[in-house]
Image (cartoon, rainbow, N blue to C red):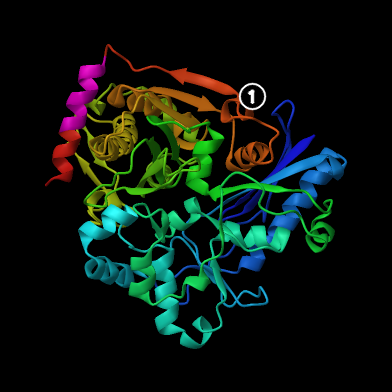
Amino acid sequence: MYLLGYDIGSSSVKACLVNAETGQVVASDFFPKTEMPIYAAQPGWAEQDPDMWWENLKLANQSVIKKSGIDVAEIKGIGISWQMHGLVAIDKNGKVLRPSIIWCDSRAVPYGEKAFEAIGAENALAALLNSPGNFTASKLAWVKENEPYLYGQIDKIMLPGDYIAMKLTGGVCTTIEGLSEGVFWDFQTNAVSTEVMRYFGFSDEIIPPVIPTFGFQGTVSAGAAKELGLKEGIPLGYRAGDQPNNAVSLNVFNPGEIASTAGTSGVVYGVLGEVNYDPLSRVNTFAHVNHTSGKPRLGVLLCINGTGILNSWIKRNMIQPGLSYNDMNGLAEKSPVGSRGVSVIPFGNGAERVLQNKDPGCSFHGINFNIHTLSDIVRASQEGIVFSFKYGMEIMEEMGMKINLIRAGNANMFLSPVFRETLAGITGSTIELFDTDGAAGAAKAAGMGVGIYSSNEEAFASLKKIMTVKPDEKNGERYKEVYQRWKKYIKQ
């Protein structure tokens, strides 16, 4: 008995086949082998063809089936994860009307800002938990104003994962989690936001039927089965955006639990047990996968743009050719906690929401040419990335979140001992590292949705913990001192 997970990214599409009885990954693959193109007709735009996602999903799916050699009749459920905040628009025949405006497209910012002002900051935040900002609803408003002929043909709008689900099943539906990440969901009325729909002039009919995140979401159609090499009738049991799904992959479901990633950009995603928001919108709040009106579970999302990209910039521009990231981590360990007085502000990858959309750039402070070495700079850079996480996590704590456990995949910046020890030390939290990814998480979550697993504890019992990092009590005060020094530089 097997479960199949798909992860629809902006760089590639991954498929993962999991043995439902052991929880072990049988086969996984991704396509394309080079990054999928993102089209930018104008500065700040970013679009992708949804059919490109489907074509690469077919390739990834065919690869894992071939690698595994299984009987496809043994696949009992499918789950989907997707790049958040994208807009897919279809007509009455299910035809895509235009390329998807994806997460990193910024053209809709003015539309979201006007909506925030018109609805009123207090009303918008209390109901939506976010400003409409640059999210899906604002992107649709851009289409409505700038492409009215096309807008008039829209029958339904979807998020990227909803589109893939439609291609699999032939049915069109969405979830509360998906609508909340598009800033369509009203947490006061527990329904699609009347305020948003009326302000933008959207018809209620444009929103697909709402279904649970876990549960029966249709079955693989005869046509999709033929294209994919699957058996008709396999149930789709789960769908969620990539950051909620990353949390799911790490078995993060409960208040106080944190999922983190630290690739090019970094994310801290924590579960809050009450409906709340940041009044300055420095972090975003969406419905988590297990949210209900009676038992709130909100995912508070902190995104730091300048994370691993700083580490890679240093590697390209400061490190001797031939040295690896692992070599850099070794260099960082040669410098003591605090990097002997060097501080690095990592915000060099565009405006940072955590700083209220300010773009201060990256900066180095305290360097003495007679004392400091490359080891100090590398360590200070890694400490600076951690401190940016801590800065955002303080906002999450102001919202009522008690942070005691951080879970992450054993990848990217978490491979650095300095990075993970500094994060544990400054937050006072235990860090657990696991061998998992989004596609595997979506597959196991599908097992919950179709009833193979009775709980998340059962579904993720097989998670392979690679390492546990406890806070360093000996250096606890030193971490706090260094962090306070770092904070002074971002307030200048």
Q: Is residue 481 rendered magenta in the image? A: yes
Classify residue 45 as left or right of residue 435.
Answer: left
Give the image location of residue 98, x and y in percent: 56, 76
257 or 46, which lies in front?
257
Give the image location of residue 224, x and y in percent: 78, 60
Image quadrant of residue 32?
bottom right
The residue sitting at the bottom extreme is 149
Image quadrant of residue 89?
bottom right
Residue segment shown in magenta = 475-484
407 or 72, which lies in front?
72
Q: Amino acid at mark 1?
A: Ser
Residue at horizontal 36 percent and vertical 73 percent from the top: 198
Residue at horizontal 68 percent and vertical 36 percent from the top: 451
Q: Which residue is mark 1?
A: 462
144 or 267, which lies in front?
144
Residue 481 visible in the current orientation: yes
Residue 4 vertical placement versus 124 (above, below) = above
Classify residue 489 as left or right of residue 226.
Answer: left
Q: Is residue 377 rendered magenta in the image? A: no
Image quadrant of residue 8?
bottom right
How many numbered circles does the render carry?
1
Give the image location of residue 350, x and y in percent: 32, 57
